Image: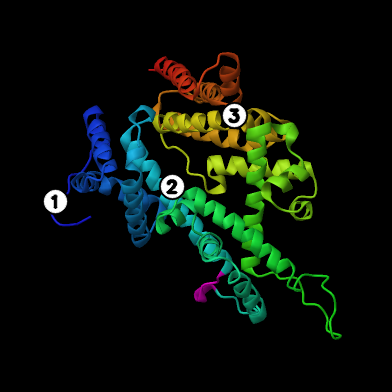
Amino acid sequence: MSNNGPRKRIDRNVGHDGQANLASLLSLIGGGDKLAFKTLYDAVSPRLFGQAMKLMRSRDAAEDVLQETFLRIWASAGHFDPAYGLALAWLARITRNVAIDHLRRSRKAQRYFVPETEAPDVPIAPEPVEDRLDIEKALHTLPTSQRDAIRSVVVEGWTHEETALRGGIPVPTVKSQTQRGLKRLRSVLEHDGSDEGAPIESGLQPRAPYKSPLRARLKEQTSIIILEAVATILRESGLNAVSIAEVARVAQMSEQTIYRHYNSRDALMRAFTQYYLDRETGGPERNLPETIAELLEWVASRYRAWETDYPIVSEIYLAPVGRELREPLHAIGYTNIMRMLKRERPHLGAEERSDIAAAMLTLMSTENFVFLHRTLGFGAKQVHTSVKTAIEAILAGTD
């Protein structure tokens, strides 16, 4: 990624030939072509850096994002498929995802550490030394692979994908090592005498429950394992098969552990629905499409995910709790489409924009996807084609 020599800058509105050229470069990069990689970098790095600057608002942070973006491009270029969208949109999506990961890690760090310039006047008690030793002692009882996975995912905050890339191992292996390690770690911590209610020995009072940041993160990872077990059951057996006992079996935990996190099946299903929605949409830190063209590309990826997880989408999203939790997302989507229409179709009146935004939301909705999939047997690509055609026809009528 040399900075020497003039860079070829891509036009903001890349034409068909430019997109085809980018797609060809990605195909060559997928085969390990370093010259193609340099050519792609020279062509699109100014644009992607501008996008990173807009998201990170710091030159240093944007440079880090750009560097990691091109590492991901090098690693995944072979997976790019022109049938599913434009090359530039794919590259922009990777940049967005990397930036969001950086922001999440930054915010996670801020949650546990107070910068000196923002430190409060009142003293803060440090984490007890004996608690740190308990965790370190428990970690050292694990096999090296499990210990390294937990340090990376739980302690340092890297994603499973990033951990796999750093270690040169498959993502499923990282997930398996993390899950097995957490299970063994919980067992050690729950039986080391540090939990509330531990027996009093030699007249000493039992220590207070462990409440360090690491314990909180371990609890969060345990919740994720529980919710992923729910997803597995839904995919394999459907909603009626989900019970606390079955979740405990699939997650390889005791029912008591499940109940510590969720006091009823209803609470568990509500948490799962919110978890799945956040994972799909990006949660509170979601990055919304900025143009109608980007929106149509984004919805194509949603349809592919919905087709893969159809039992979850059809049974959970359309259940009463799913409809309730999706309502705020509908409001966000409506507002965003109204903003797009105002920018791209400034001649439209407010009422006409509102009607079009409502129609677009309806066409792109989970309900419409399930109807077309269940009734007409449409796959994700067919649903996207029909929805895109309908939206383009509506917009063409406003020109």
Q: Which is more N-terminal, label 3 or label 1?
A: 1
Task: Find residue 89 and report its horizontal and vertical position in percent.
Answer: 36, 37
Q: CA separation, marks 1 and 3?
A: 49 Å
Near-viewer residue (176 or 108) = 176
Q: Which is more N-terminal, label 3 or label 2?
A: 2
Task: Find residue 198 and report its horizontal and vertical position in percent.
Answer: 82, 72
Q: CA separation, marks 1 and 2?
A: 28 Å
Image quadrant where one finds the N terminus: bottom left
The residue drawn where x is 44% and y is 37% is: 289
Observer-side mark, 2 or 3, equals 3
| Residue for badge 2 | 97
Task: Find residue 29 and report its horizontal and vertical position in percent.
Answer: 26, 43
Quick one: SS at disc 2?
helix
Near-viewer residue (16 or 209) = 209
Q: Is residue 205 magenta?
A: no
Q: Which residues are magenta?
A: 113-118
| Residue for badge 1 | 6
| Residue for badge 3 | 310
Observer-side mark, 1 or 3, equals 3
Kind of residue sitting beneath label 1: Pro
Above or below, comparing residue 374 to residue 55 in the picture: above
Quick one: SS at disc 3?
helix
Kind of residue sitting beneath label 3: Tyr
Circle 1 residues within 10 Å: few <14, some 14–19, many ≥20: few
Numbered circle sitting on residue 161: none
